[in-house]
Amino acid sequence: MLNTLIDAAGMGRRAVARIGTLMGYVAGWGFLAISALITFDVLGRRFFGISTQATTELSGYALAFGMAWGLAHTLSMRAHVRIDVVVNLFPPRIRQWLHLTSLGFLGVLTGYLFYGAWTLVEESMLFNATDISVIRTPLAIPQGLWAAGIGVFFVLIIALFVEALLLVLAGRTGEAEALLTSRTYQEEVAEALEAVGEPVPATTASPEVKP
């Protein structure tokens, strides 16, 4: 029964992680697009005396929603900045609960942020608020994109917490650790070697974990 629940939780977590990955790619392309717009504006003002007059506004929106849309993918890749010096001194049976506790606190914080973000979107929709700019963007649009990124991040935290908790209760400590711990330097080295097309030594390759 417990293994069935673990499989179901894993499927849910992977489904949300795939959405987060897609959002991460969209955010990355958004940064490239806004970089191109900024370049166009700079060159246009310098050589042709023209400007979109919206670069500052749109780049702010791209930065806000891009950061939010990258949160879930970063979590699924275990790439958020963490300091595990003290935690790693504990034995696995204690360390796994510390990881779960930290993930739980992250979930509480993110849930609060999502609530605040969605409340802000609702207020903007209620008052038909627009930005004070040339294009007068309805604020609910960039705010909604920003809130969506936080929302997917929150859902992924819940899915990850449930799966990891079930793994711990089932005694599958190694799998729980693979989901909860930060990436090791061996994994970072393996990723760098793969990126440049170099073979990964057996001593460096990390165990396969389904993202």
Image (spheres, rainbow, N blue to C red):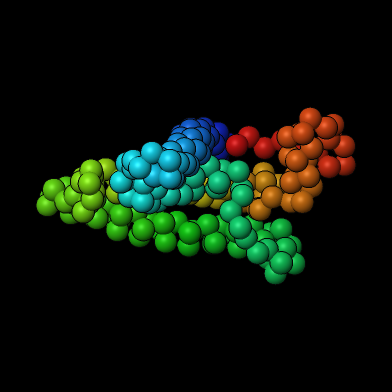
Residue 139 visible: yes
Measured as percent of width and height from the top left, residue 151 is found at: 37, 47
33 over 111 or under it: above or below: above
- Give me the residue at 79% from left, 30% from top: 197
Query: Which residue is at a point 54% across and 62% down the rendered structure image?
Result: 101
Give the quarter of the figure containing the C terminus: top right
Q: Position of residue 189 (x, y in %)?
A: 78, 44
Residue 131 falls left or right of residue 149: left
Q: Position of residue 134 (x, y in %)?
A: 22, 46
Pick the residue in front: 152 or 60: 60
Query: How many numbered marks are there?
Result: 0
Front residue of 118/9: it is 118
- Taking the image as drawn, is residue 155 in sight? no
Residue 65 relative to residue 132: left or right: right
Identify which residue is drawn at 18% across, 54% down. 123
Extreme bottom residue here? 86
Q: Could you tell me which residue is drawn at 41 percent across and 60 percent down? A: 108
Residue 5, x across and y down, in percent = 51, 37
* In the foreground, 3 or 137: 137
Give residue 141's quadrant in the image. top left
